[in-house]
Image (cartoon, helix red, strand yellow):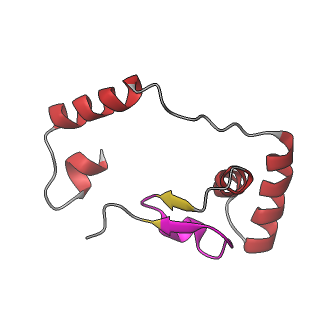
Amino acid sequence: MAVTEKVENPIPGEVAERFVTLINEFDGWKVMHLDGQSVVRAIRISEEHDTHYWDSQIAAVMERNGISKILTENEKDFEGIPGIEAENPLKG
């Protein structure tokens, strides 16, 4: 709902719906799974950097897959986690 409500120039709901439909229909996504090693790493990240466990899970899976940048509205959730750059795509 961010692009239909939270931005300065929101897009119409039907445009957002079509965009999401196209994303869902795209078959080139790489799905990254949470495995046991990532769970252990997430616990460590959460404890060492005082982050929420769920954000630490994302960081651990990113780390395991060589991903260093995340697009999110919640940049602060990833502050202080080494190797993770968080960017809010909705900020102007």
- Any magenta on residue 74? yes
Q: What residue lies at 67% left-to-right and 55% top-to-bottom?
A: 66
Q: Which residues are magenta?
A: 72-86
Image x and y of residue 4, in percent: 21, 46
Q: Is residue 55 left or right of residue 71?
A: right
Q: Nearer the viewer, residue 19 or 10?
A: 19
Q: Nearer the viewer, residue 80 or 6?
A: 80
Q: What residue lies at 52% left-to-right and 71% top-to-bottom?
A: 76
Q: What residue lies at 70% left-to-right and 51% top-to-bottom?
A: 57
The secondary structure that most of the magenta stretch takes on is loop
Image x and y of residue 54, in percent: 66, 51
The part of the image, by quadrant, that contains residue 81 is bottom right
Q: Nearer the viewer, residue 3 or 38?
A: 38
Q: Is residue 78 left or right of residue 12?
A: right
Q: Quadrant of the N terminus?
A: top left
Residue 16 higher or lower than 86, as above or below: above
Residue 82 higher or lower than 61, as above or below: below
Q: What residue lies at 31% left-to-right and 26% top-to-bottom?
A: 21
Image x and y of residue 9, in percent: 13, 57
